[in-house]
Structures are given as C-alpha cells and as structure tokens.
Image (tube, rainbow, N blue to C red):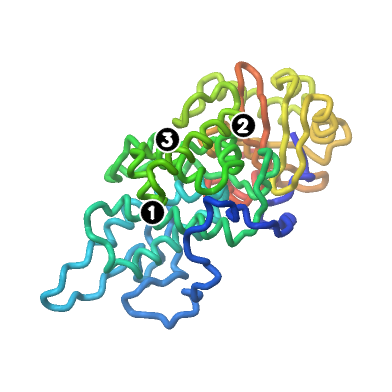
Amino acid sequence: MPTDATPDPATGPTPAARPDPTAGPDQTTGPDPAARPDPAARPAQATGPDPAARPDPATGLAPTGHRGPATGLAPAADPGSTPAPDLDEAFRRHRRELHVHCYRMLASYDEAEDAVQETLLRAWKGRDTFDGANVRAWLYRIATTTCLDAIRSKARKPVTTQQEVNWLTPYPDTLLAPALDEPDVVAVARETVELAFLTALQVLPPRQRAALLAKEVLDMSAKETADLLDLSLAATNSALQRARATMRQHLPSHRNDWSAHAPSPAERELLDRFIEAHERCDAVAAVAIAAEDLRVSMPPLSLCFDGLTAVAPLIERALGPDREGDWRLLPTSVNRMPTAASYLRRPGDTLFRAFKLDVLRVEGDRIAEITTFGTALFDLLGLPPTLTPTD
C-alpha cells in the first residue's frame, strides 16, 4: 500500500549510530573485532582464503579463479602430520544453514553475508585447532561468536519494541531450500525466518538470542548450547528461561512454536486479492482484506502506522485518483511469507518499474501486517527490473 515514501534499503537513510547492546553482563566474552587486522588488507595467498570472494549463500561457490574456505584447497600437510579436516566439503555443505543462522542473529541479509564470510575465514585460520569431532558444531560456534562480535561493533542500543528494528531486511525464499545432500535436512527445514520472529529476536540481549536459537531452532541440547556460548549449564538455562518469557511477550498470539510454515492456501488467496485490488486501484477492496488493527512499517525508516485510520492516507495515495501512476504486482515469497513485488508506471512512462516489496502477515482471513521494503533483493528473487504492459 505505501508508495514512494518507502526507500530502497540499499539507498535509504542510515540509522544513527547507537550504543553497544552487548555491554550487559552476559555480553562480555568474544574478541573485539576492531582489534583484528582487516583480512582484506593481507597479502594474497595462492591457497589461502580470499575474503573478497563472496560465495553464493545457497551453494557456497565463490567466483571462478578464487580459492579459499568456500571453494578452496587446503595447504599440503607436512609429512607425518595429522591430516587437516576436509574444510572445503564442510564449508560447502554447511554454508547455507550458517548463512540463515547469521541472518536470524542479525536480521539483515547483507550483514549475514558478511558474518558468514568472516566465519569461514576464522575457521580457515583456526583449522589446526579443530579436533575433527563435530565440524557442524564447531562452525556454528564460530558463526555465533562472529555474530556477537558484529552486534557489538554496530553499537546499536537494545531495542524494546519490534518497530525499532530499522535494519531489518528480507531473506529471499529462493535461497532457503536446502540442497539434497545437505546434512541435517530436518533441522534445516525447521528454520524460522518469519519477520515477526526475526524482529522479536532482536529485542533479546544477543547471548539470550543465540541461546534460544541453538536450543529451540537448531534443536541442540542444553549442554551443546552451553558449549556453543562458552557458558555454564546453569547460566545457559537461565538465559533460555528469560528469552522464552520475552519472546512470548513479543510474538503474535498465533505463533506457539519456532518452526517454519510455508504460506497456506488462505494466505495465498489473500495475496491474490491484495494484488488484484492494487492493479485495479480499488481502495475499497484493499480495505476489505485488511484487519482493523492493520500495521504498516517501512524499514529502514522508523515509521509505523497502526490501524486502518492511520493507514488510510497511504491507501489513498497509492490507489486514489491522485495516485502517482498505475501498478503491476507479481506474487513472490520472502521469509516464507506471502509477498507482492510492486511495479509502478508513472504518467508518461511506457514501463512498469520495480518499486517495492510488500510482505504480508496474515491472521485468520485478514492481513494483519504489511512490511514494506525496497527493491534491493529483486534480482535474488528472480524478478525483472521492469515490466511492459503486455508482460
């Protein structure tokens, strides 16, 4: 429903720097990323990791010609030494799930990409310390520490409400399907990336967030969770108890578990009606499928419109007689939620141009929330930049 009040997250205003959310008593561990040398500044090595080679999160493959932790070749072992673990294969098989884990921790696709690349670099540098027992747990521990360091470096103040998470970005469903040979497919299929869950997670202190994800989403035992975070079992259980209580306060009432759910037939039908209402510029039809307490937000802007009365001016601007043009919408999906990709044709133009993504949260037979993003992920979703009137 919102029109060009919604910026492209790639070009929109940058949130002001905020204090470190990890300064609390449970955020004292982990190296300071500022103290680490910039890996990009190191001399290139023939067989070492190349941080500039950013693999595709779905496949773990770096661009042709790059060798490193995502694709590369381990240095030849000295005769008689313990063979190095097959990190190439481990990185390939686990990179996608690590990417999603980092995304849940950070609520930003691009920040998750940076974190998983740093995770692979740290693992590569520390490969001699790996005992070979459980490569997946080892990589998750490195990824979690990397995310905690990243959160600390962002200097964001703790959020108290979900609309304060103005760094939130969507995650394309095209990158969520696990490969057939990916391990732990059952656990991967339970990945929870619904926006309401992501933003509720950001209310938690970072270590509570990591503990909750390890126990409830990754299905780790309490001991495995404690090992992941380098905490005592008692401290881990306490963190989990507090995290669960906070999540119950911030999640929608219909969400009683952390498992993923594909859009239901009812949700897909509401998406179709949403698309039809916009393409017909039918404000009455748009209102008919919206809940009375409809919420509209537009990250990265700290804007939130609660209730149909507050949203009415947005509907009028988008669909009324003085609207800025005509609409074409394509159905898609991000964060396993029904999503409409909107294209706007302004007066005098011959093309419909990519404009925004509207992600719908449905409760019952009404749209309860619309989160509007820019066009940065259109390419990853396989969406064209423009449409013709005949497309």
Three-letter residue code for mark 1: Arg
Please tell me the numbered disc located at residue 167. none
What residue would you read off at disc 2?
A: 250
Q: Earlier in the sequence, mark 1 or mark 2?
A: 1
Residue sitting nearer the eye, 285 or 139: 139
What residue would you read off at disc 1?
A: 141
Q: Position of residue 229 (x, y in %)?
A: 41, 50
Residue sitting nearer the eye, 344 or 97: 97
Quadrant assignment for the N terminus: top right
Count every numbered label the image shows and give the total.
3
Q: Position of residue 235 (x, y in %)?
A: 44, 43
Disc 3 + disc 1, Cβ < 8 Å: no
Q: Is residue 153 left or right of residue 97?
A: right
Residue sitting nearer the eye, 65 or 94: 94
Count neighbours of disc 2 (C-alpha within 10 A) and say few if under 14, some if 14 to 19, many if 20 or more.
Answer: some
What's the residue at 72%, 38% (across, down)?
297
Three-letter residue code for mark 2: His
Q: Is residue 293 left or right of residue 69?
A: right
What residue would you read off at disc 3?
A: 216
> Helix or strand or loop: what does disc 2 sit on?
helix
What's the residue at 61%, 31% (across, down)?
250
Quadrant assignment for the C terminus: top right
Q: Is residue 170 left or right of residue 138?
A: right
> Helix or strand or loop: what does disc 3 sit on?
helix
Count neighbours of disc 3 (C-alpha within 10 A) and say few if under 14, some if 14 to 19, many if 20 or more.
Answer: some
Q: Position of residue 88 (x, y in %)?
A: 28, 62
Q: Whole-Å distance between the Cαs marked 1 and 2? A: 27 Å
Q: Is residue 111 shown above or below 288?
A: below
Q: Is residue 62 shown above or below 156?
A: below
Q: Can residue 306 be seen in this snapshot?
A: yes
